[in-house]
Image: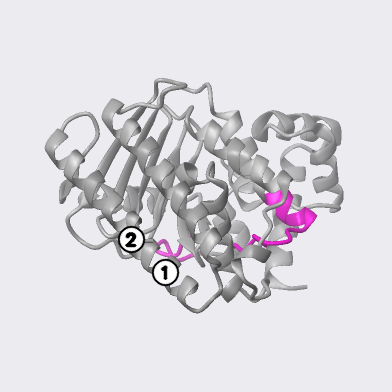
Amino acid sequence: MSESQFFYQGFLSAIQHKIPQRGMLAKTITELIGIEKDAVYRRLRGDANFSFTEMALIARNMGISLDSIAGIENLQSKPSKMNISRQVNPTEVDYEMFEGHVNLLKSIKDEPATKIFGAGNQLPHYLYQDYEYLTRFYRFMWNLSSSYGTACPYHEIVVPERLFFLQKESSRYARHISSTLYVFDSMVFQRLVNNIRYFARISLIKADDVLLIKNDLINFLNDLEKLALKGKHEETGNEVSIYISETDCDTNYSCLKSKNIQMTLFMTFILNAIVSMDDDVFHETTTWIRSLQRTSTIISVSGEITRNAFFNAQRDIVDRL
């Protein structure tokens, strides 16, 4: 048995020890993670696996220590999980992972005082996933490098309707978060445009497709500017603060906080993530983001001159495509 299988079996044993009666256990888990009871029974039977996020939420509410299950004794060693989902031609297991995140966001959408903190040198996925051709480009990039992908030109990348729907649902529920903070690397659009131009130059993206991506980027910038101007999501009225960093963002962080969840995502391989539900990791990451915020310039609501200059500069960059 591998270490991951040993850990997973330890988790199942722990929750069954807490609530030995199977029907009551299934009911409790259904209420905790917001999925259908049949899906819970499939996980308990071993036909499907709980995601790491689901496990952490269950463990937190049942008073189970994942550290103890994993045999972690060093206080500076924190449990985490690498989520490597297939972003092109996803399997049913991948869809369960995507659906798990959507269900998590859905389960907390009516909670007060929920928060998202994000910082990095890549566009936030909650913002760009509504744009079909931009989404396809990120999947094209992932497909070129991942061992799960098969390198192919941009025009051969297809985002399945089911996956695109889940992405849009993820973005929709993220707009229900009470307060969101984004810190953008000042070079985020320049880097993205440089990548698009490079792949067009080596004929992996056709000229017509470049124009489609460019149009998405123009629409994205227009929508982002409206969001920055109002400082809130139009459909929910929830607060959004946007900053432009004066220093380089070395990686992409995202944190989600609710009444029972403190989740940290370290974005890897463009579209995958290392996930931690540890409170100390969450605190350290949000401290880094807040530190970055202090050396950044706000462009939401206030800072009109800076905001106009930033968006004019980004449009000039995109116009070069």
Q: Residues within 10 Å of mark 2 (few under 14, many from 20)?
A: few
Q: Position of residue 213 (x, y in %)?
A: 49, 54
Task: Residue 273: tell me if it is visible.
Answer: no
Taking the magenta stretch, the answer to whether it contains residue 112 is no
Q: From the viewer's perspective, tell me whether residue 227 is left or right of residue 59.
A: left
Q: Amino acid at mark 1?
A: Arg
Tag 2, which secondary structure?
loop
Which mark, by number, is residue 197? 1
Q: Are marks 1 and 2 in contact (CB under 8 Å)?
A: yes
Q: Residues within 10 Å of mark 1 (few under 14, many from 20)?
A: some
Tag 1, which secondary structure?
helix
Kindly indicate the quadrant of the structure image that contains residue 154: bottom right
- Residue for point 70% across, 53% down: 11
- Residue for point 43% across, 30% down: 114
Identify the mark nearer the N-term, 1 or 2: 1
Q: Which marked residue is nearer to the observer: mark 1 or mark 2? A: 2
Q: Quadrant of the N terminus?
A: bottom right
Span highlighted in magenta in the image: 73-97
Q: Amino acid at mark 2?
A: Arg
The residue positioned farthest toward the bottom in the image shown: 202
Q: Nearer the viewer, residue 64 or 224?
A: 224
Q: Considering only vertical position in the picture, is 73 above or below 307? A: below
Q: Which residue is mark 2?
A: 320
Chief secondary structure of the magenta span?
Answer: loop
Q: Position of residue 101 (x, y in %)?
A: 61, 43
Q: Position of residue 259 (x, y in %)?
A: 47, 30
Q: Nearer the viewer, residue 32 or 203?
A: 203
